[in-house]
Amino acid sequence: VQLVESGGGSVQAGGSLTLSCAASDYILKHCMAWFRQAPGKEREEVAQIDSDGNTNYADSVKGRFTVAKDNANETLYLQMNTLKAEDTGMYYCAYAHWVTCQSGFDNWGQGTQVTVHS
């Protein structure tokens, strides 16, 4: 198993959660991203961090979510603040086929569930 997510749970709207994705030094050199999938909806990318540490966010989470890599601990994080009910879903971390984000994501963790109660 190359990617292991943790940190999901149930929280009230307005609350915070931090998701973790245990990886490896090799994987962290790739572009990595967090995706989520709500029931009945397609999986969507919410945050991305490339090999240089540059980040991009979906408009729906800008200003509330922060993605970061911790190379020392070989972990990818997603700090989620001011959570909303529409943030509910299964969250997955992923890394790119090659190093660059443009190569696409085809390596996935098993996911961690986030439920936000309004």
Image (cartoon, grey):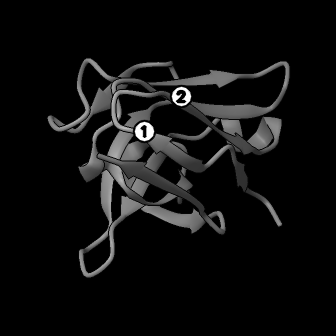
Image coords of residue 50 (percent x, y): 46, 31
At x 24% / y 75%, what residue is drawn? 41
Q: Is residue 106 left or right of residue 57?
A: right
Q: Amino acid at mark 1?
A: Gln
Percent position of residue 84, x then y? 28, 40
Dot 1 falls on a residue whose secondary structure is strand
- Viewer-proximal residue among 49 and 42: 42
Report the residue at 54% width, 43% height from top: 99
Residue at the location (40% across, 37% down)? 48
Q: Residue 13 sits in which quadrant? A: top left
Residue 51 tag number: 2
How would you rate the neighbour count of disc 2 (Cα within 10 Å): few for under 14, some for 14-19, many for 20 or more? some
Pinpoint residue 103: horizontal percent, then vertical percent.
40, 55
Query: In the displayed structure, would residue 63 be above or below residue 106?
Result: above
Quarter of the view holding residue 47: top left
Which residue is more in the foreground, 51 or 5?
Answer: 5
Q: Residues within 10 Å of mark 1 (few under 14, many from 20)?
A: some
Decide if residue 50 is on the left or right side of residue 43. Answer: right
Relative horizontal placement of residue 61, taking residue 93 as reference (left or right): left
Q: CA distance from mark 2 to mark 1?
A: 34 Å
Judged from this view, the residue extending furthest toward the bottom is 40
Is 57 placed left or right of 11 in the picture? left
In the foreground, 105 or 17:
17
In primary-sequence order, the first of circles 2 and 1 is 1
Quadrant of the drawing holding the N terminus: bottom right
Query: x, y percentage for residue 89?
Result: 40, 61
| Quadrant assignment, res 66 | top left
Farthest residue to the left: give it: 59
Name the amino acid type tagged 2. Answer: Ser
Disc number for residue 12: 1
SS under mark 2: loop
